[in-house]
Amino acid sequence: MIMLALTKGRIEESAIKLLQKAGYSCPELDDKGRKLMFYTTGGDLCIILAKAADVITYVEHGVCDAGIVGEDTIMENAKSVYEVLDLKFGKCRFALAGKKGESFDSSYAHKVIASKYPNVTKNYFNSKNTDVEVVKIEGSVELAPLLGLADAIVDIVETGSTLKENGLEVYETIAEISTRLIINRASVKMKRLEMNEFINRLEEAVN
């Protein structure tokens, strides 16, 4: 049996549809209530629903063989997991954004950037050899420039409608992201046949 950690929320529905397309049936998920562990018909998979960052932790520590998680979480946590497949849903992008009509020139003055993703933000500006102050925000990061807390934000952007409604706009795209299949390196060796079949079935469903 393969232990699969699946991100709850935004990714969950599309991931379940993909698993069904790959031939994995799990009727328990139709009426899951507060349960967090589910078994597919035939016992091929044990599906664990978890928060995104925890999916990476479970796979990294080997309590789960594989995980389905957004690339944004992988980039932010920078854990030693092995990405094997782009599942091609949950597509969006990391973007630098701020007040509409204002320019962002990091070469002038001290800049403050607000983000839910401080590591992604730091890595991006380090790659540009730019020193900025990063403030972590847990909630609606769009408020930071409006309240004068930050000069700009780094956040996930899908349609851009939330930015527009709050008088903000994208200055730069940092990275295109999507949902990924990650696996535990030891599981590939210990469950080689099962893991290969699982990966191949998902790959065929994606394509």
Image: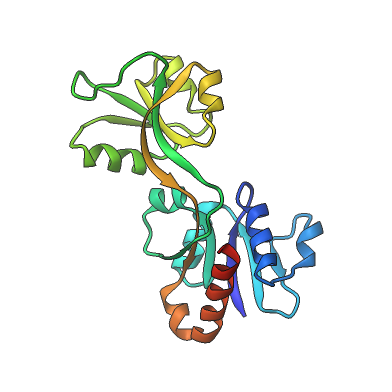
Q: Foreground residue, 194 or 5?
A: 194
Residue 164 position in % (x across, y down): 52, 21
Judging depth in this view, the residue of 10 and 78 nearest the camera is 10
Estimate the x, y position of residue 193 in percent, counting from the top left: 52, 86
State the residue at coordinates (45%, 40%): 93
Question: In this rendering, is residue 200 above or below 7?
Answer: below
Residue 159 is left or right of residue 83, and the answer is right
Q: Quadrant of the N terminus?
A: bottom right
Colour mode of the rendering: rainbow
Question: Residue at coordinates 47% horizontally, 78% vertically from top-left?
Answer: 187
Front residue of this view, candidates 46 and 42: 42
Q: Position of 77 compared to 122: left or right?
A: right
- Looking at the image, residue 26 sits to the left or right of residue 1; the answer is right
Pick the quarter of the image with the C terminus.
bottom right
Q: Residue at x 49, y 50 (%)?
A: 178
Residue drawn at 71 percent across, 67 percent down? 38
Count of numbered circles on the image: 0
Residue at the extreme front: 207
Q: Position of residue 162 (x, y in %)?
A: 55, 26
Residue 74 against residue 188 in the figure, above or below = above
Q: Position of residue 205 (x, y in %)?
A: 60, 66
